[in-house]
Amino acid sequence: MEADLKADLKSLAEEQPLYALKEIVMRHEGQKGAAIPILQDIQGVFGYISPEMLQRAGEFSGIPVNDLYSIVTFYAQFRLEPIGKNLIQICHGTACHLAGAEKITESLQFETKAPAGKTSEDGLFTLEKVACLGCCSLAPVMTINEETFGHLSPDGVRKVIRETRKISSAEKSREEVTS
Ligand code: FES
């Protein structure tokens, strides 16, 4: 899904989630083998796929909900629980592994307080180990909300996470004041 469209659908999803979900499904109308692309787009916009989203996706697309359920439980790429404010994906492909991804992951876990595959208790970080991110010359690599950070060191990770925490906390306070 193109970045602009994704951003539009994300803001629509905040106001009218059901309408956004319908829009996503309708974009694939008539497309053969649409189930996986629909589910990928739902996750891209909402960050995860809940049982209710599956139900609605089935209703809007005509694809049996059981089929959708089998797909999301079979493929590891699908998340069934909400993610934190910042999604961190740390690469464990061969190049990153050789360049010290394990140490970087330990540092990330320490700084974010999120175990690998989980979300921190404060809801700020979700940490995922992933396969090659496609930029091996930058190994070891991670992404935070689609921004790429390469040539990582434990110290570099600490700085990036502390900065991200500062920005996220400031945003949270702003949201609390305006809500
Ligand atoms: S192995 Fe990490 S980006 Fe390719």
Image (cartoon, helix red, strand yellow):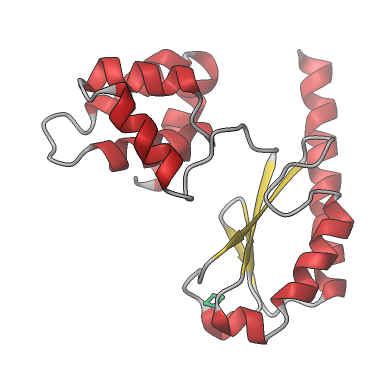
- Rendered residue at 23%/22% (across/down): 61
- Rendered residue at 87%/73% (across/down): 155
Query: Is 46 on the left-hand or right-hand side of 100?
Result: left
From the viewer's perspective, is residue 173 above or below residue 110? above
Residue 162 shows in this picture: no
Which of 27 and 39 lies nearest the eye of the viewer? 39
- Rendered residue at 28%/27% (across/down): 25
In the image, residue 115 lies at what x, y percent?
Answer: 78, 51
Residue 52 shows in this picture: yes
Which of 167 and 45 lies nearest the eye of the viewer? 45
Snapshot quadrant of residue 178: top right
- Rendered residue at 42%/14% (across/down): 18
Snapshot quadrant of residue 129: bottom right
Query: Is 64 on the left-hand or right-hand side of 131?
Result: left
Splitting the image into four quadrants, where does ligand 1 fall?
Answer: bottom right
**Which quadrant holds the N terminus?**
top left
In the image, residue 9 lies at what x, y percent?
Answer: 42, 29
In the image, residue 159 lies at what x, y percent?
Answer: 86, 64
From the viewer's perspective, is residue 48 above or below residue 157? above
Query: Is 33 on the left-hand or right-hand side of 98?
Result: left
